[in-house]
Amino acid sequence: QAKLSGRNQFHLFDAEQDQQLRTHHNQRARVRQALHESELCLYFQPKVNMRLGHVTGMEALLRWQHPEHGIVGPLEFLPLVEHTDLIIDIGDWVLQQAMEQLRQWNREHRQWIVSVNIAARHFQSKDFLPRLRKILADYPDVAPERLEIEILESAAIQDIQHVREVMLASQKLGVSFALDDFGTGYSSLSYLKRLPANTLKIDQSFVRDMLDDKDDLAVISAVIGLARAFNREVIAEGVESAEHGVALMRLGCMLAQGYGVARPMPALQVSDWAKSYIMPAIWGQDKDLHWE
Ligand code: C2E
Ligand code: MG
Ligand code: MG
Ligand code: MG
């Protein structure tokens, strides 16, 4: 970006900016290298139905196994690339890995849905659909119904007509959608009406304080009401304790994900976790719960 200096002269980059750009450039190149040298991997975090006491699926969450820094979370490196086409390559890789994992779970965990987070730039790219179709076609023994795509509510409303069309076309292929971090994106009721997302995913910031903060409880209650009115599913993320789980069930939200159920884990640990997992007893025993 050109910068107007004090003396009315243009400098393309000042020294400081140049330094910064070079650093960002290097960092992006390093992320690209991580993708190509197989340093990226997926962790999986369970989603459960608290009422029925079973696992409904797993969310794939990106990790970078950095040779020097160990496991690095996505918020440390995705923001560097989310406005470049590298986010599309990473997203396609994540989709492909998720399909691969679904295939490996064909026998033991065939009823699980795997959710993948897709960035706005990726979802809005012109060839999102043909690329998705190709990835699905590469796994003929995995039903597309077992794949869910999570899109940030805030991203979905940026270009609602396009997002709507891509969602509808993807749903025709069998893929379902959740609006992630729901409640933080300022979408209006008319937006929600036009967005055919299957699920609203209540943002963890509301869940975290719901036991102490009446306003957060009110937001959650409203989102659950919206989901019901629009005939969508609703799931809460960031469910850290059985108390949170019970409070959510009381409000009518039966699906949960959070450290109170399990932390994200490497794929290799998932089957053992599923075998030994016992729902917190209290979730199933609250007689006052008004089941639907
Ligand atoms: P998200 O999709 O909303 O995922 C939830 C985040 O909250 C995850 O962080 C998860 O580890 C964390 N979390 C889950 N349960 C709890 C809980 O009970 N308490 C607390 N405090 N946190 C919890 P993570 O893995 O660091 O991912 C952060 C964000 O990065 C994700 O938010 C998602 O937006 C993005 N992301 C993750 N993987 C991908 C990916 O493959 N592609 C893209 N484009 N974005 C991704
Ligand atoms: Mg998500
Ligand atoms: Mg979220
Ligand atoms: Mg989030």
Image (tube, grey):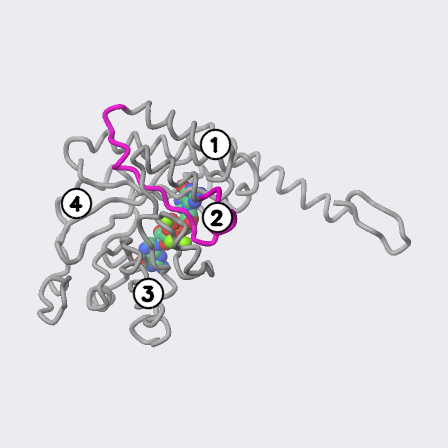
Residue 211: x percent and y percent? 29, 73
- Real-space CA distance between mark 2 and mark 4, rounded to the nearest whole angstrom: 38 Å
Q: Looking at the image, is mark 4 or mark 3 nearer the viewer?
A: 3
Q: What element carries label 4?
A: helix
Which residue is under mark 2? 160
Which residue is under mark 4? 274
When the figure is inspected, residue 125 is found, relative to residue 242, above or below; the finding is above
Which residue is under mark 1? 89
Residue 63 in view of the camera: no
Residue 134: x percent and y percent? 38, 25
- Which one is earlier in the sequence, the residue at label 3 or at label 2? 2
Question: In this rendering, would 52 be left or right of 15?
Answer: left
Q: Looking at the image, is mark 1 or mark 4 nearer the viewer?
A: 1
- Which one is earlier in the sequence, the residue at label 1 or at label 2? 1
Which residue is under mark 3? 207
- Which one is earlier in the sequence, the residue at label 3 or at label 1? 1
Q: Is mark 2 on a helix, strand or loop?
A: helix
Q: Amino acid type of disc 2?
A: Ile
Considering every residue shown, the one lying at the far right of the view is 7
Residue at the spot 36% in from the left edge and 30% down from the top edge = 96
Residue 205: x percent and y percent? 39, 64
When the figure is inspected, residue 133 is found, relative to residue 248, above or below; the finding is above
The magenta segment is 140-163
Q: Do the residues labelled 1 and 4 touch (CB within 8 Å)?
A: no
State the quadrant of the N terminus: top right
State the quadrant of the C terminus: bottom left
Q: Amino acid type of disc 3?
A: Val
Residue 180 in view of the camera: yes
- Real-space CA distance between mark 1 and mark 2, rounded to the nearest whole angstrom: 23 Å
Residue at the spot 18% in from the left edge and 53% down from the top edge = 49
